[in-house]
Amino acid sequence: IRIGQGFDAHRWGEGDSVWLCGVEIVHTQTLIGHSDADAGLHALTDALLGAAGLGDIGDHFPPTDPQWKGASSDRFLLHAVDLITQRGGSIVNVDVTLICERPRIKPHREAMRARLAEILGIAIDRVSVKATTTEGMGFTGRQEGLAAQAVCAIEI
Amino acid sequence: IRIGQGFDAHRWGEGDSVWLCGVEIVHTQTLIGHSDADAGLHALTDALLGAAGLGDIGDHFPPTDPQWKGASSDRFLLHAVDLITQRGGSIVNVDVTLICERPRIKPHREAMRARLAEILGIAIDRVSVKATTTEGMGFTGRQEGLAAQAVCAIEI
Amino acid sequence: IRIGQGFDAHRWGEGDSVWLCGVEIVHTQTLIGHSDADAGLHALTDALLGAAGLGDIGDHFPPTDPQWKGASSDRFLLHAVDLITQRGGSIVNVDVTLICERPRIKPHREAMRARLAEILGIAIDRVSVKATTTEGMGFTGRQEGLAAQAVCAIEI
Ligand SMILES: [Mg+2]
Ligand SMILES: [Mg+2]
Ligand SMILES: [Mg+2]
């Protein structure tokens, strides 16, 4: 078993939907980034790369590279999964926490878990998505942006 | 083995004691929340639920539900432990970090570890409570609130 | 297997180099602290101590103790490694995330991994160093300071 951890944050901006953990949610704002700014997928991709000692998301998908502009982040996560699988590894479980005041995550949790399980190629009971707020404090509390943390256990 | 991670934050307000990791500490302020606002117990409860893929603390104990008003958070943690035990699982170890400028945690660490070990039903050497500051920066540094992080390993 | 997690932050101040994960980087500022303020090493030291249930870095190296003034933080990490080894334990893998807008970490990543592997006494493929930003938000985004998170898995 090896473990990894990831952290990511993106800024809120004008828009009418946001991608989180591979699911599009109708919302009054969107997250800004070079790709689709899915902080949940980015944190989880980093956790997998970290567990496997394979660098970070910025190495594999440089934000300065125009080919990743507007990219759907599930390809980032899938790439990390492929790297682990190619080395004979497998994913034991993952746990993602989304830190934001809005949108509400709970109504979308099962869709997010199902989508992550699909990309990761593991059973849904090995996939956790949680949400919390910072009670109005800090950049997430002031709703300047959303942060995500993830941990994972892999066998490799 | 599966692993989980939790994060929680609560705001400082008027009061003369604070609950942290199941221990009441005399302090010049208290943490504000619907329950007793024990951010250490909340982060750890979320870590356990995350490792087991069982949702988050907000699912099991909605802050909008009046029955949890002022609730002692050890019941939240105990509920997560029970859910894991009922599934034939067991807790391997837990590690909690409290992020605050004050109060000092060290004088209360052993009491916190003992209380957590008691609720979790594991040996005290499998329970860690640590503290750090953000050196005056951010919402914890400005003493607007306290944050807590936790990780856990479980067998299930 | 047991797991641990650590978090640390230090404030930027006047200087011309910064220590991160045991490597000195030429930079326009330095991190301020009682020791060399290597937040990466401090977070990792705390993760190891947490996994082993051995307190935190402040217990072993009190910032009020003059003997640690300006200390090279690799001795803190080495001490945690020694405590684990003395108990018959071993380190499975570690994953460190540095959260800052600057300096760029990628050019120094392999040197950091090599140095950590050396101190930890494990193969470099079991050592991960990642970097992320908070997109201009919060204390790391405003470049008031740098934060670091670490997780580890140990056998003990
Ligand atoms: Mg990102
Ligand atoms: Mg809470
Ligand atoms: Mg430090």
Image (spheres, coloured by chain):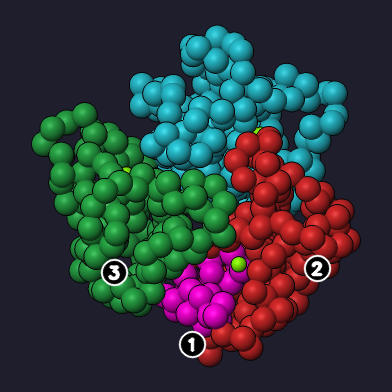
Chain colours: A green, B red, C cyan
> In this picture, is A122 found above or below C131?
below
State the residue at coordinates (23%, 52%).
A15
Host chain of mark 1: B
Q: CA distance from mark 3 to mark 2?
A: 36 Å
Position of C81 with respect to B53 (left or right) is right
> In this picture, is B23 found above or below C98?
below
Q: Are there few (<14), some (14-19), or many (20+) residues within 10 Å of tag 1?
A: few
Q: Observer-nearest residue: A87 or A32?
A: A32
Q: Which residue is mark 1?
A: B87
Q: CA distance from mark 3 to mark 1?
A: 23 Å
Host chain of mark 2: B
Residue A4 seen from this side: no
State the residue at coordinates (77%, 67%).
B19
Q: Secondary structure at mark 2?
A: strand
> Does mark 1 fall on the same chain as mark 2?
yes
> In this picture, is A74 found above or below A49?
below
Tell me whether the residue at label 3 lies in contact with that at label 1, contact meaning CB atoms closer than 8 angstroms: no
In the rendered image, which quarter contains the C terminus of chain C? bottom right
Q: Main secondary structure of the magenta part?
A: helix
- First in sequence: mark 2 vs mark 1: 2
Query: Which amino acid, mark 1?
Result: Arg
Q: Which mark is residue B23?
A: 2
Q: Which residue is mark 3?
A: A112
Q: Which residues are magenta?
A: B42-64
Q: CA distance from mark 2 to mark 1?
A: 28 Å
